[in-house]
Amino acid sequence: MAIDVPTGEVHAFYAYLGQRLQQGDQPLSPEESLRDFREYQRQLEDLRSKLAEAERSSQRGQSQPLDMDALKARVRHRLSSEGIVD
């Protein structure tokens, strides 16, 4: 039984498996590996979609430079309000 699978997808799956094996992840069955790869692909596509929308938003002038000091202050405030201190 032959199944048409795009060559790029086969290479991506091969690279995904290689990376998991190099990281020493627990071995999975072929079905589990494919399921995990599909979920990884879904998450990757979701991220790409969000990045593309952020870029379009920025091109429309709906963004501003990231203020790291203000971000750190907000995170510290949020953590301290939850009782977490450094």
Image (cartoon, helix red, strand yellow):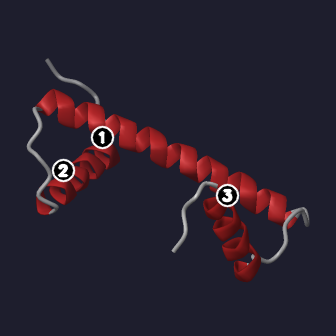
Q: Position of residue 60 (x, y in %)?
A: 90, 62
Q: Position of residue 78 (x, y in %)?
A: 67, 60
**Mark 2 or mark 3: whose residue is earlier in sequence:** 2
Location of the N terminus by quadrant is top left
Residue 22: which numbered mark, if any?
none
Residue at 57% in and 52% down: 48
Residue 17: which numbered mark, if any?
2
**Mark 3 or mark 1: whose residue is earlier in sequence:** 1
**In this rendering, the label closer to the viewer, 2 or 3:** 3
Q: Nearer the viewer, residue 49 or 67?
A: 67
Task: Answer left or right for 8 relative to 52.
Answer: left
Mark 3: secondary structure: helix
Q: Which residue is mark 1?
A: 37
Determine contact: label 1, label 2, CB under 8 Å. Answer: yes
Residue 81: which numbered mark, if any?
3
Q: Nearer the viewer, residue 48 or 64?
A: 64
Q: Nearer the viewer, residue 83 or 55?
A: 83
The amino acid at mark 2 is Leu
State whether residue 44 is above or below residue 42. below
Q: How many marks?
A: 3
Gap between marks 1 and 2, in whole Å?
A: 8 Å
Q: Nearer the viewer, residue 44 or 9?
A: 44
Mark 1: secondary structure: helix
**In this rendering, the label closer to the viewer, 3 or 1:** 3
Residue at 24% in and 34% down: 34
Q: Position of residue 18 (x, y in %)?
A: 16, 57
Q: Residues within 10 Å of mark 2 (few under 14, many from 20)?
A: some
Residue at 20% in and 59% down: 19
